[in-house]
Image (cartoon, helix red, strand yellow):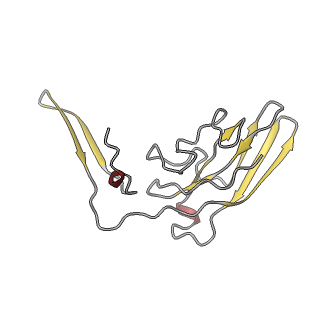
């Protein structure tokens, strides 16, 4: 695996794999376009409301982001420790926000989530994911 930082340039590349006339083919086409996508801003106004074992998580879209609200999806981690991901994984690096998959955030385009949790202390955060699957930094974690 190449750990050259220039490969984390926020440009989607293309991997082609399969067989042609019985021959195995795999090619990685690197996107070398002139501009790269800037990450969106982090969501704001994180709130949670607990009722028994049900928790409503809510947040606001990033203010002033270039992508626009319609182009964003959201990614939420939940853990039993700050920056924890042992309850729900965000499919992104919790420290940097770097996306591990080219996909919508785990909550789609929703600005809220309802989760059922056993009694205890939990920490959560939220990340905005733009239409090029680039993730924002995670908003400040909440308990």
**In the image, residue 99 above or below residue 116:** below
Compare residues 76 and 4 and report the one nearer the observer: 4
Q: Residue furthest front?
A: 4
**In the image, residue 76 above or below residue 18:** below
Question: Residue 79: percent from the left, percent from the top?
Answer: 69, 37
> Residue sitting at 72 percent across and 35 percent down?
80
> Residue sitting at 31 percent across and 51 percent down?
13
Question: Residue 138: percent from the left, percent from the top?
Answer: 61, 53
> Residue sitting at 71 percent across and 57 percent down?
59
Question: Residue 32: percent from the left, percent from the top?
Answer: 26, 60
Compare residues 89 and 105 and report the one nearer the observer: 89
Compare residues 97 and 74 and report the one nearer the observer: 97
Q: Quadrant of residue 117?
A: top right
Q: Quadrant of residue 2?
A: top left
Q: Is residue 28 left or right of residue 142?
A: left
Q: Residue furthest bottom?
A: 64
Please count the marks in the image. Answer: 0
Q: Residue furthest top?
A: 22
Q: Dividing the image into 4 quarters, which one contains the N terminus?
A: top left
Q: Is residue 17 left or right of residue 111?
A: left
Question: Residue 116: percent from the left, percent from the top?
Answer: 76, 35
Q: Is residue 78 left or right of residue 41?
A: right
> Residue sitting at 57 percent across and 48 percent down?
95
Q: Residue furthest right?
A: 52
């Amino acid at each position: 695996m190449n750990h050259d930082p220039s490969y984390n340039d926020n440009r989607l590349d293309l991997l082609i794999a399969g067989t042609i006339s019985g021959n195995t083919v795999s090619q990685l086409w690197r996107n070398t376009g002139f501009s790269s996508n800037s990450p969106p801003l982090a969501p704001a106004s994180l709130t949670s409301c607990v009722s028994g074992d049900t928790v409503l998580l809510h947040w606001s879209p990033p203010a002033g982001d270039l992508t626009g609200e319609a182009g964003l999806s959201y990614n939420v981690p939940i853990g039993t420790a700050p920056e924890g991901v042992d309850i729900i994984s965000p499919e992104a690096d919790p420290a940097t926000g770097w996306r591990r998959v080219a996909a919508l955030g785990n909550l789609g385009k929703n600005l809220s989530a309802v989760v059922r949790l056993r009694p205890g202390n939990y920490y959560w955060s939220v990340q905005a994911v733009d239409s090029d699957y680039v993730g924002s930094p995670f908003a400040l974690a909440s308990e």
